[in-house]
Each structure stands twice: as structure tokens, then as C-alpha cells.
Image (cartoon, rainbow, N blue to C red):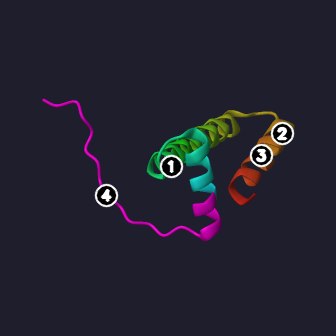
């Protein structure tokens, strides 16, 4: 069985400012714009997973808390995570 990952071709439209920034990063790193986009997407996905883990950890601490002050503090943190 092959260990190579399957690649899927996608077509996207970027705002001009974002495209310029991607091009600048590609030139600076001496890689293709596609490689820069893949890395940025992978990094963004990892950040999203980390935020999700932090949210569920905080929610678990909130559920297990017994001190009213801690419950309020954790509830406030949850609110900021959800609503900004």
C-alpha cells in the first residue's frame, strides 16, 4: 500500500491584498505560492483545533467547578471565547 497522500485540486479566488501577501511570502521563502497557501491553511487548521481543545478543557473545568467565584470567572471566559 502506498504511503503517499492523495492531493485534491481546488480553485480559489483571493482578495488582491491577500494574493499580494502570499506572493511576497513565496518570494521571501523561495517557494511556490501554492506551498505558502498550503502551509497557511495547515497552520490555520491547527490553530482551530487548538482553540477547540481549549474550549472543551475550559467547559470541563466549568462543569466540575464548585466555588461560585471560580464558576463566574470560568463562565466569563467561556462567554469571551464564544462571543468575543
- Cα–Cα span, label 2 and label 3: 14 Å
**What kind of element bears circle 2?**
helix
| Region of the chain picked out in magenta, as a range | 1-20
Which residue lies at the image location 48% right of the left edge and 70% below the top edge?
Answer: 13
Q: Position of residue 77 (x, y in %)?
A: 77, 46
Q: SS of the residue at dot 4?
A: loop
Q: Which residue is mark 4?
A: 9
Q: Position of residue 7 (x, y in %)?
A: 29, 48
Give the residue pinned by disc 2.
68
Measuring from the top left, give residue 75's x and y in whole percent: 76, 47
User: In percent of the image, x 57 and y 62: which residue is there?
Assistant: 19
Counting other residues with Cα less than 10 Å from the Cα at mark 3, is it few (<14), some (14-19), or many (20 or more)?
some
Residue at x 63%, y 56% (from the top left corner): 21
For mark 3, give the secondary structure: helix
Front-most of 58 and 67?
58
Label 2 close to label 4 by CB (< 8 Å): no
How many residues crowd around disc 2 within 10 Å: few (fewer than 14), some, or many (20 or more)? few
Q: Tell me if mark 4 has few (under 14), some (14-19) or many (20+) residues whose alpha carbon lies within 10 angstroms of its own.
A: few
- Label 1 residue SS: helix
Query: For this rendering, which residue is in front, 18 or 50?
Result: 18
Would you say the residues marked 2 and 3 are in contact, meaning their CB atoms lie under 8 Å apart?
Answer: no
N-terminal label among 2 and 1: 1
N-terminal-most mark, 2 or 3: 2
Asked whether 62 or 23 is in front, the reply is 23
Which residue matches tag 3? 77
Q: Nearer the viewer, mark 2 or mark 3?
A: 3
Q: Is residue 80 left or right of residue 8?
A: right
The residue under label 1 is: 41
Amino acid at each position: 500500500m502506498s504511503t503517499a497522500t492523495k492531493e485534491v485540486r481546488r480553485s480559489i479566488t483571493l482578495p488582491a491584498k491577500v494574493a499580494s501577501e502570499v506572493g511576497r511570502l513565496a518570494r521571501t521563502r523561495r517557494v511556490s505560492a501554492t506551498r505558502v497557501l498550503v502551509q497557511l491553511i495547515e497552520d490555520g487548521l491547527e490553530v482551530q483545533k487548538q482553540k477547540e481543545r481549549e474550549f472543551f478543557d475550559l467547559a470541563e473545568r466549568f462543569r466540575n467547578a464548585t466555588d461560585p467565584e471560580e464558576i463566574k470567572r470560568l463562565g466569563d471566559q467561556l462567554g469571551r471565547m464564544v462571543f468575543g
